[in-house]
Amino acid sequence: MRYNGQVRAKKHLGQHFLKDESIAERIANVVPFEGVDKVLEVGPGMGVMTKYLLRMPHIETWVVEIDRDSVSYLKANYNVISARILEEDFLKWNPSLTFGDERFALIGNFPYNISSQIVFKVLENRDQIPLFGGMFQKEVAQRLCAGPGSKTYGILSVLCQAYFDLTYDFTVPPEVFSPPPKVESGVMHMVRRNSEPDIPFKLLKRGVKAGFGQRRKTLRNALKVINLPEGFDHPYLSKRAEQLGYEEFVELLNAIEDGRVER
C-alpha cells in the first residue's frame, strides 16, 4: 500500500517515519563502529538512515523489517542491500541463523511500543551485540542512562549499566516525523564493557525485577518474592532498589545466593 510513492505509516507497527536528513545522519553516527564488520538496522522503513550507514565502507549494512511495504520500497530503492534485507520480526529473529557467532552492531529508530523488548533482547545477546544505539521515546532513553537515586532509574537502567557504558546523545522533536508522535524522542548508545559482573544474568535480572517490583518498599520487603534465606541480613536490605547501583545489586544478590548455600 503506497502513498505518493511512499510507504504509509502503520499505527499498529508504531511507525513514525523520520523525515529530517540531518538527524538521520547524526543517528547513524552515534555508534562507534569499532571491533565489528557488520551493522543491523532495525525497522529501516524507507531507508532514511540506511543511506548513511551504506556510506560507511568498513561496515556491511543489514536491515530487518517486518513491514512488507517497507521491504518492497527498500528492494526497489536500495538494490545494493536486497540480499541483506531480513523480512521478519526482530524480536523473533535468531542472530546465529544470520551471523553465526560473529559480533555485530545494532542500530535503529525503534518503535516505542517494543523498545524495552528490543533492549532486553540486546542484553540477552550482549556477547554478540557489543554496540547498540538509536532513537527511543525520550523518557525511555533517559531511563536507560539514569543513575541511582533518579526517579527514572529502573530495571533496564541497572541491567544495561551492568554490561555497557551508556551515553545519552541528543533529543529529537516530534515535528521531524511523519506522522509526528505525541512525545519527544531521545537518541542514546551503549558500548559493551570489557568485563562483566560476576553473577549469572538470569539471577541479576530476577533480583533487579523483584527489587523494582515494589520500588517504594525497602529491599528487605521487596525481595521477599525471591524467598530470602531464613535469618539473612545485609546492610543493603534497608535501602530501596533505586538507591543501589548495579555493583551493589550484584553484591547483595550474590550474598543472598551464598546464604542459600550455607543453609
Image: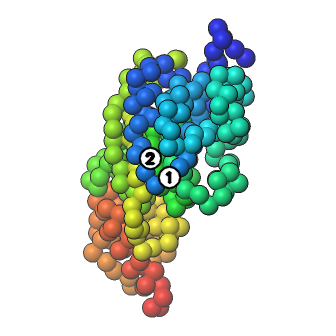
Residue 183 percent across, percent down from the top left = 42, 26
- Residue at (53, 67) in percent of width and height: 202
How many numbered marks have been drawn onto this rendered protein structure?
Answer: 2
- Residue at (61, 40) in percent of width and height: 62
14 lies left or right of 173: right
Which of the 4 quarters of the picture holds residue 141?
top left
Is residue 106 visible from the viewing direction of this image? Answer: no
Q: Are the residues at dot 1 and dot 2 in contact (C-beta closer than 8 Å)?
A: yes
Which of the 4 quarters of the picture holds residue 211?
bottom left
Q: Nearer the viewer, residue 116 or 223?
A: 116
Q: Nearer the viewer, residue 215 or 255?
A: 255
Dot 2, how many residues are within 10 Å of its Cα: few (below 14), some (14-19), or many (20+)? many
Residue 146 percent across, percent down from the top left = 32, 48
Q: Which residue is mark 1?
A: 36
Q: Which residue is mark 2?
A: 33
Q: Compared with residue 53, is residue 2 higher up or lower down, i.e. above or below?
A: above
Residue 152 percent across, percent down from the top left = 34, 45
Quadrant where the image shows the N terminus: top right
- Residue at (44, 47) in percent of width and height: 33
Residue 110 percent across, percent down from the top left = 52, 36
Tell me how far mark 1 sits from mark 2, CA to CA. Answer: 6 Å
Amino acid marked by disc 1: Val
Is residue 194 visible from the viewing direction of this image? Answer: yes
Dot 1, how many residues are within 10 Å of its Cα: few (below 14), some (14-19), or many (20+)? some
* Residue occupying the far top of the picture: 4
Amino acid marked by disc 2: Phe
